[in-house]
Amino acid sequence: MEPNEKTDYTGATELIPLTELDEDDICQDSQPIEADGTTEENIGIEEFLPTPPDGGWGWVVVLASFMNHFIVDGISYAFGAFMLEYTEYFKSSAAKTSALMSTLLGCYMLSAPIAGALINKFGCRPVGIAGSILAATSFFVCTFVSSIDAMLFLFGICGGIGFGFMYMPTIISVSMYFEKKRPLALGIAMCGTGVGTFAFAPISKLLLKHYDWKGAHYILAGVIMNGVLFSALMRPVLTKHDRKLRTDKQKRQIVPVKKMEEKKANGLHPASRVSNSLSTKATNARAGMMSHPDLRTYEYGSRLHNSTVHFYHSTHRITSPKSASGLTVQEAENLKRPLYKKDIFYSGSMYHLPEFRKAHNMQEYIVSTTSFPAAHTDAAPKTAFSCRCLPQQIADALSEMLDFNLLKEPSFIIFFVLSMLIMLPYFIPFAFCSVRAKQMGETRSEWLISILGISTMLGRLLSNVIALIPKIKAIYINNVFLLIAGVCCAAIPFTYSFIATAAAAFFYGLFMGANIALTPIILVDLIGLDRLTTGYGLVTLSRGVSTFVGPPLAGQVYDYFSSYDIAFFAAGGLIVFCAMCFFLLELPGLKKSHTQN
């Protein structure tokens, strides 16, 4: 590859761990760049790897993530307060009206892989801002529709995608800033879900008391627009190379000013200097002096050395650990993209990971959990996203998060199916608990949603704290908590007072919150850290699909029986069934399979 040759970076590719390449694969024809006009730079690959500061601006990012959770999940989970208003206005059935919530939450989850791919290309900040604008616009525009079907598209689909684009940056940005303190940071950020649900349920009732549902939507749209500000705070982590570029740029800005002052002092007009500079640049370009650009300019062809790790070159050449002259700066810049980190969705303690225990220091761990793609060629592995019209970073992320080959693993198939089933009843208490209480004449029904929200937050925190205990497996915590949650859900129809219903709702949220919180930790135990991104993407996809079905199915049950009790019985029974089936993952055959993984 010539120094000034551009490499095609489009298409989906296989991600190659930096430390898992053999010496036999090292290419012998990698030659240092000839020094015609320039000298070769000797830079370690660690300059291009973002090192989480575990603090600093990261706490501002945690606050921004908390507030976006507060907005997104608070508004989504408080849907029950609006359900009767929608039913009366659109003259729709309970099943059709509950489809609004299921569509909103379903698209919220289904958009996660797309949001992750866009973040891998553009970063957390622009994706979060775009999601805030889309969701706010959807909430505002849907007030002008007169049919429930149009409402499903604007409020459900567009609003759900906007919320998904707001949500995914909250997870990735915190993970980029924290490594050792990640469980604490993510725990604080995700508390926004419980606090938001607790706050928005009574706020929604207050808005509906003074305005109709349209006026409430206008105010909620304004609240959602605050996500633009919070997403803007999610600035990327700077690498050593980024800092050097910034320093060099500042120096280049200072030097011309000094020269300008000297020219003015000598009586030479600034315009003549600019003209001479442009003429000199044009002459240099014609002479071919730009074919070997400086390393700091981001131009193609610049090379660097790497003294610590093996590297997979974009033209399928492997460079020696002592000489990585085949690697361009443009290629190395991809290392800071979040979806090339294998632990980006991991929410547990780093000390439980074999990769972290084997590493001698944090830098070595970061290298061991970073993958780098080879550019798309005819010889490269083909995937469903091997399309040259997609930027490489987007295609790589989609291929990684939606690699359906993982469904060939028996243990993952069980977890995948059970995760899909468990989401069918998950939101039924959120959607119908307050509606049932209101039908019984209870004037404080909106507080049931608040109780569900705050207890879900406490359940997530509690399960994560228990999971930090080394000898307690996350799958056992998940199973026991689900069993208790199922019993609490099935007990709701037997409650006829506000206190009793509130108690059942509290314990349901407390024990149901563990399932989502422990998912990344369980996936690492099942399939290993290398495939966590794939497993997380597929599980999120399955949950999005099942969320479309759960609330409308419960609404159909109500339309047929004129009671929500059957829906609560069925939901509780299904949760208990799934909890028992999760124990299948500990069978000797399956346990041996995922232990090898």
Image (cartoon, rainbow, N blue to C red):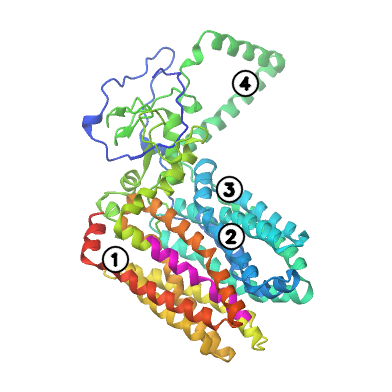
Number of residues whose C-alpha sits closer than 10 Å to that of mark 3, classed few (under 14), some (14–19) or many (20 or more): many
Q: Is residue 583 left or right of residue 169?
A: left
Q: Do the CB atoms of the residues marked 4 and 3 lie less than 8 Å apart?
A: no
Give the image location of residue 211, x and y in percent: 78, 72
Q: Residue drawn 52% across and 55% down?
A: 110
Mark 2–mark 1 Cα distance, whole angstroms, equals 35 Å
Under circle 2, the secondary element is helix
Q: Picture quarter containing residue 328?
A: top left
Residue marked by disc 4: 259
N-term mark: 3 or 1: 3
Number of residues whose C-alpha sits closer than 10 Å to that of mark 1, classed few (under 14), some (14–19) or many (20 or more): many
Give the image location of residue 165, x and y in percent: 57, 52
Residue type of the residue flagged with mark 4: Lys
Residue type of the residue flagged with mark 3: Val
N-term mark: 2 or 4: 2
Mark 3 or mark 2: which is in front? 3
Residue marked by disc 2: 68
Q: Which residues are magenta?
A: 416-435
Mark number, residue 585:
1
Does residue 203 appear anywhere in the picture?
no
Q: Residue drawn 56% across and 55% down?
A: 164
Q: Residue drawn 33% across and 20% down?
A: 32
Mark 2 or mark 4: which is in front? 2
Mark 3–mark 2 Cα distance, whole angstroms, equals 13 Å
- Tell whether position 27 is magenta: no
N-term mark: 2 or 1: 2
Under circle 4, the secondary element is helix
Q: Is residue 171 left or right of residue 518?
A: right
Q: Picture quarter containing residue 295?
A: top left
Give the image location of residue 227, x and y in percent: 63, 56
Residue type of the residue flagged with mark 2: Asn
Residue marked by disc 3: 127
